[in-house]
Amino acid sequence: MLFNKVDFIQQSIDSKLIHFDELALQLYLYQLKHNITLHQYVALTNDKTDVKSVGDFRFLPVNFFKQHQVTSGSFQPQTIFTSSTTTGGIPSKHFVADLSIYHKSYLTAFNQFYGSPTQYVFLCLLPNYLERQGSSLIDMAQGLIDASKQPESGFYLYDFEKLAQTIQHVLKQHKQLFLLGVTFALLDFAEQFPLDLKNTIVMETGGMKGRKEEQTRFEIHEFLKDKFKVQHIHSEYGMTELLSQAYSKGDGKFVCPPWMKIVITDLNDPFTLMPTEKAGIINVIDLANVDSCAFIQTQDLGRLLADGTFEVLGRMDNSEVRGCNLMYV
């Protein structure tokens, strides 16, 4: 059967009833044939010639995006997303053939988790990401700002006083506020401008960049909840190499959209699947990633829970710490 990308996206992101395993197998076989990097990696590591299920998949280590052009087929990219790095580090590069797929992915997921963006004023506190080129987070935030159609929605760097004034203005208008921020900036802002945001959604995207002493996610969330007078701090789990994100609404449990799935493998044997509740390496299947690689082994540790959610427990030892992951649970 010929692989039709348009039909595939229609069946995954657009569909309300997704036969995930069937679609994942279809995409895996397609990318195994057309993605040179994945093909070569599998040829070196896989002794299974008959791939029938997720348990037979090989997940491409995320570091390959630093040294290889990871694409399925040949195309002229519409954009190249790049990861943030520590000084002297090599960024990952995600060659994106069709930006509309990314836009469809994050807008559809946002609608499923939070409702229409038109309900919110988005105030995005994303220094560092705004100060460089190629951030997929900035692209997503801009899309949400545009979709909100609210004149107050916008980006902020370090102008905390202006942000505080805008927040107070929005709250006086009784509009629903969505404060999206990189973690270190939210901490700095909360420390300097504690506010009563009890009806606001506050979401941290990760990102400490060595700006503060290491803190657990629990400690960070407790601090932000106290300063902002909110019951929950929301979180996003995503990365440059993906086109989809998972969300947590404040209990540390992340939920994937229907076209994204987490697979946990053994830390000592990354080809062995771990049972529910057991910790291991987080691997991601992202069906939106049709033109790159949809099967990625991250450098994060986590576990699947019985209710289908997952937790992020930290970083693998000896893995490079990227700017978006300098936070431990």
Image (tube, rainbow, N blue to C red):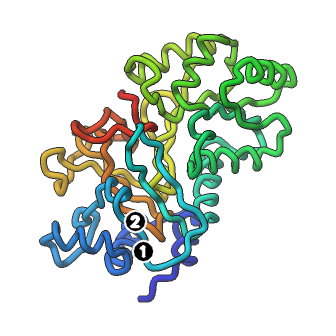
Per the rendering, the mark at residue 301 is none
Residue type at mark 2: give it: Cys
Classify residue 202 by image quadrant: top right
Q: Nearer the viewer, residue 92 or 190?
A: 92
Q: Quadrant of residue 253?
A: top left
Secondary element at image label 1 = loop
Residue at 43% x, 42% y: name it. Answer: 85
Q: Earlier in the sequence, mark 1 or mark 2?
A: 1
| Rendering quarter of residue 294 | bottom left
From the viewer's perspective, is 283 left or right of 138?
left
Q: Give amino acid for label 1.
A: Ser
Neighbours of disc 1 within 10 Å: few (<14), some (14-19), many (20+): many
Q: Position of residue 8 (x, y in %)?
A: 51, 74
Residue at 51% across / 82% down in the picture? 4
What SS does tag 2 mark? loop
What is the number of callouts on the image? 2
Give the image location of residue 283, x and y in percent: 32, 52
Image coords of residue 93 (percent x, y): 45, 57
Are the residues flagged by discs 1 and 2 in contact, CB closer than 8 Å? yes
- Residue at 40% from the left image edge and 54% from the top image edge: 261
Q: Which residue shows up at 75% across the image and 37% down it?
A: 154
User: Is residue 295 shown left or right of residue 152?
Assistant: left
- The numbered mark at residue 293 is 2
**Foreground of the two, 173 or 163:** 163
Q: Is residue 128 above or below residue 158?
A: below
Q: Which residue is mark 1?
A: 72
Q: Quadrant of the C terminus?
A: top left
Q: Categorize mark 2 by other alpha carbons within 10 Å: few (<14), some (14-19), many (20+).
A: many
Q: Is residue 192 above or below residue 139?
A: above
Image quarter hosting the N terminus: bottom left
Which residue of the protein is positioned furthest toward the front in this rendering?
Answer: 88
Rounded to the nearest whole Å, what is the CA distance between mark 1 and mark 2? 7 Å
